[in-house]
Amino acid sequence: MHRTIFVTAIACFVLQLCCIAQVQGPAMLPAAAPAVTFRNIKLLKGMKGDQLLATMKEYDKALNVKCDFCHEIKRLANGSLSGYALDAKPMKAKAREMIRMVNSMNNSYKTLDAQATCWMCHHGHPEPEANGM
């Protein structure tokens, strides 16, 4: 009886891991760790690793994309991911433009109360939604 419960628990755990991997996909950001070094940071300098990762996840959510939408990600032989620092994809440059725009809006328009985000225009889509104007 105990063996059946143990085997069932292990099977549920493995199934849960498979579901998480399928939902998140292989191109998810690495977990924040003190040893992680971020390179080629141009606009989000000064953020701690966990803040940077949380910000990137917010961008993913606002545009309903994964990390590889902007980043050139490669899985290395040891299973780790590489290529986040590369500027190979044009969407990374576009993302930087959009970050500058949102920062400018937050700094220029006091009525926004520094609350402008990607979500305001994108609403979970890679391209901004038409506003009917």
Image (cartoon, grey):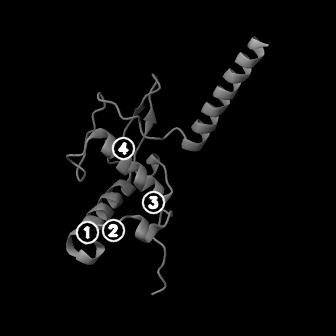
Q: Is residue 71 above or below residue 34?
A: below
Residue 86, horizontal then vertical, whole percent? 32, 43
Please name the residue that numbered disc 2 is placed on. Answer: 116
* Badge 2 element: loop
Horizontal side of residue 18 vs 53, given as left or right = right
Q: Which of the two discs, 2 and 1, labels the residue nearer the N terminus?
A: 1
Please name the residue that numbered disc 3 is placed on. Answer: 62
Please name the residue that numbered disc 1 is placed on. Answer: 106
Please name the residue that numbered disc 4 is placed on. Answer: 53
Residue 12, horizontal then vertical, whole percent? 69, 28
Furthest-right residue in this view: 1
Q: CA distance from mark 4 to mark 3?
A: 14 Å
Instruction: Sort mark 4 into few (<14), some (14-19) or many (20+) by Cα contacts within 10 Å.
Output: some
Q: Which of the two discs, 3 and 2, labels the residue nearer the N terminus?
A: 3
Disc count in the image?
A: 4
Residue 115, horizontal then vertical, whole percent? 32, 67
Q: Tags 4 and 2 in contact by the CB under 8 Å rule? A: no
Furthest-bottom residue in this view: 133
Q: CA distance from mark 3 to mark 2?
A: 12 Å
Q: CA distance from mark 2 to mark 1?
A: 6 Å
Instruction: Sort mark 2 into few (<14), some (14-19) or many (20+) by Cα contacts within 10 Å.
Output: some
Q: Tags 3 and 2 in contact by the CB under 8 Å rule? A: no
Q: Tags 1 and 3 in contact by the CB under 8 Å rule? A: no
Q: Amino acid at mark 4?
A: Leu
Of residue 80 and residue 8, the one placed in the foreground of this image is 8
**Residue in view at x 38 percent, y 51 percent:** 89
Name the mark nearer the viewer: 3 or 2. 2
* Badge 1 element: helix
In which image quadrant can residue 94 be found?
bottom left
Q: Amino acid at mark 2?
A: Ala
In which image quadrant can residue 97 be found?
bottom left
